[in-house]
Each structure stands twice: as structure tokens, then as C-alpha cells.
Amino acid sequence: MNSFNIQNNTLHAENVGLAQIARDFGTPCYVYSKAALTLAFERFSAGFEGSDHLVCFAVKSNPSLAILNLFAKLGAGFDIVSGGELARVLAAGGDPKKIVFSGVGKTATEMQAALKAGIFCFNVESASELVRLNQVAAEMGKIAPVSLRVNPNVDAKTHPYISTGLKNNKFGVAYEDALSIYLQAATMPHIAIHGVDCHIGSQITELSPFLDALDRVLLLVDALKQQGIEIQHIDAGGGIGICYSDETPPEFKEYAMAMRAKLGNRKVKLVFEPGRALVGNAGVLLTKVEYLKHTESKNFAIVDAAMNDLMRPALYDAYHEINAVQERVADDTNPALIYEIVGPVCESGDFLGHDRTLALAEGDLLAIMSAGAYGMSMSSNYNTRPRAAEVMVDDSVCHLIRPREVIADLFALEKVLP
């Protein structure tokens, strides 16, 4: 099923034309397909049917309350990395008993909030964090359930900024140190060892890194058992990539079969933290061409979306397909040209796409595809630009799930000197 499709020469989200959405809600605007979100979650979960498992959506990829609420209704758990994300999940109706708390810099206040909520597990990322968590839990009279995030030093074969499982990354504890830290944890009165966690990166398009990492985790589980430490769950993290252009990531079913086969007859719960895989291709960024600017060396299409709305191209040099909402027929008066798609932000790095062949006119609408992950979640107010509206499409109905920000709100909390 392709939730973004052409009907009557106009790109649609399900059965609503993107041109209509632009008229109703303005641009730039994030548009999500409820059907695409639902289908992605159901397909991911289906691969593990019949086994003890928990699918925890990685909130950082898209923290929209509407999306979190949808996944919660579908039975999802959540992978969080801050106290703010914890509050979002709870506000969206998420079950705290299905929350895993990752991240290298958890504060005492965040630990207190998570313990009070009664989360499923803390993914502990350093020996120092383990000590602090034990102290915080003791002060509250609670026992903290933990997994140790183990760094298996496996190359995820992805962009270096989103690779997290190598020994020079800030995440997790060194594989060689994991056993001794687990033995330390076993002596702490307010720590309960529940699992082992491993997350090696994002936008991974091959199976082998996942399987190599799981091999190392299983060796650690066996070593822990020899020390009398029984592991209840293995958190295999997330990281399955999506197709932005010509990538061929593994199908969810293929991934599930390979992971289950590797696990064998072990009686442990499998936990997963997919983010991009569930939301990436379920959203687009809708934008309008403000100006066409032709220079001696380049043609620029200056649009009303910018790097503050979609940071990935500027940050990672990431590719997003860019389609005309209503395609023009190229002719002698309006030929197809090679354009730089750029925004109005005052930075040379403010681009959304390089070298795109399009027949354009000022006022045309463009859809920046595969923008459902790390789009709105990484957006900012740089250049005092209000963040975009967000719309969820459910068949032929549109829901405004986040209104566009108002400029006055951007500095409402600021004070001038007396």
C-alpha cells in the first residue's frame, strides 16, 4: 500500500489531495498517513507473533502526541531518552510498564520521574549511571529494573553520525567491561538486573550487523548465566532503515525470522526499539515555491520550508525525494531544469535537495518525501521561524494535530533588561 499516491494528476495523502491540505493549513506543513503508520507497526509486530516480545517505538524519531497515542492504542511500548519524552508518552496514553529509558545522561530528576511512573526498564549506559540510579532508587524506597546497554563494537555500515555501536561512540559500556559491571550491579540492593540492551545505530540496510551484534549479546548472556545472573529480556534496539531513494533494507518479516532463528530456544523476551522504520515513509513535508532564481551556474527554487523545518539534509547531507504536488508538463515555455531546492534561512547550508530535475513555476507545491522521522522532531525556530503545522490524514479526513506556531509565542517567555 502506498499512502502517498497520484489521483487526478495530484499527489494525495491517502484520499486527500496535498493541494487541498496546503489551502486549508498553509505551508510548510508536515502531513502524516494514519494508514501507513498503522500498517508499519502491524507488519513489524507480525514477524514476532507467537513469541514473547515488546515493540517500543523510539519517541525521538517523532514525538507527536497523536502518533504516540496511535501506537499506544496499537499496543506499542516506547523507547525514551529524556524526562520530557516520558511526560509526552504518559500524556499520550502510553503504558509506563512498556517504557524503556535509554540515553547517556539521565539526571536524578529524570530517574525519579521514571521510577515513580513504574517503567519497564532503564537501559543503563555507564557504571557511574548505575551508581546514581541505585542511590536515587534507595532514596525513594524502590527497586530499579535495569539492562546494561552493551557496546558490541559492530560496524552498522551507516552514516557516522547515526552509528552508535562502535567502541569510539559515546553510547553504552564497552563489551569487555560489561560482565564486571553486571557483577557490580548484582551487589546493589536497589538494582534488579532484568536484561541486556544493544543498539548499534540507525538507517541500517543490511541484516548482518544486527546478527553480529546479537551473537555478541548472546555470548554475554551465557557468561552471565554462569555467574548466576539470569537475563529476562534482550533488547535488540532499533535501526532498520527505510528507502529514501534506492536503498534496499531488509523486510520486517526477514528481519524477524533471522533474529528469532539466532535466539533459538532461549526463553527470554525480545524487545525492539524501531523508530524511523515505523514513521519515516509515513510523512511528507509540504512546501511552496516562493521564487525561482536563475544564475549563471545554478537554478534555485526557493521554497518556504527550510533547514529549521527539516534538518537532515544540512546535518547529514541526507537525500529526500522531492515531488511536485501537481506535475507540470515540461515544454518550451516551461522546460524542466536542474534545481537546487533551498530555503529562506540565512545559511549557505540551507538546502533540502541538490540537482533535482523539475518543471516549476512560482507558487507550485512540492512534497519532500520520507519526512516522517527526524523531521518535526529536529525542527527549530532558527531565524525566528515558527515551526510547521502537522496534519494527520485518515482516509478522506484531515486532523490538525499541531497548529502552526505564532511568532509572538516564540519570545513570550523572554524578558528585556529593566
Image (cartoon, grey):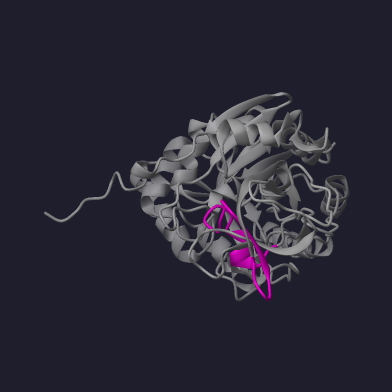
In the image, 8 versus 193, the foreground residue is: 8
Expressed as whole percent of the image width and height from the top left, the position of residue 77 reads: 63, 38
Expressed as whole percent of the image width and height from the top left, the position of residue 299 reads: 68, 66
Q: Residue at x 82, y 38 (%)?
A: 2
In the image, 357 versus 273, the foreground residue is: 357
Side (left or right) of 178 relative to 40:
left
Q: Residue at x 64, y 30 (%)?
A: 70
Q: Is residue 323 above or below residue 395?
A: below
Residue 338: image quadrant is bottom right
Expressed as whole percent of the image width and height from the top left, the position of residue 110 reads: 41, 48
Q: Is residue 253 above or below residue 333?
A: above
Segment tinted magenta in the rendering = 294-318
Q: Is residue 188 visible?
A: yes
Q: Residue at x 33, y 46 (%)?
A: 139
Q: Is residue 234 above or below residue 63?
A: below
Side (left or right) of 378 relative to 73:
left
Work out which quarter of the rendered image holds the C terminus and state it: bottom left
Q: How many marks?
A: 0
Residue 35: image quadrant is top right
Residue at the left extreme of this rendering: 418
Residue 45: image quadrant is top right
Q: Is residue 339 above or below residue 3?
A: below
In the image, 236 versus 323, the foreground residue is: 323
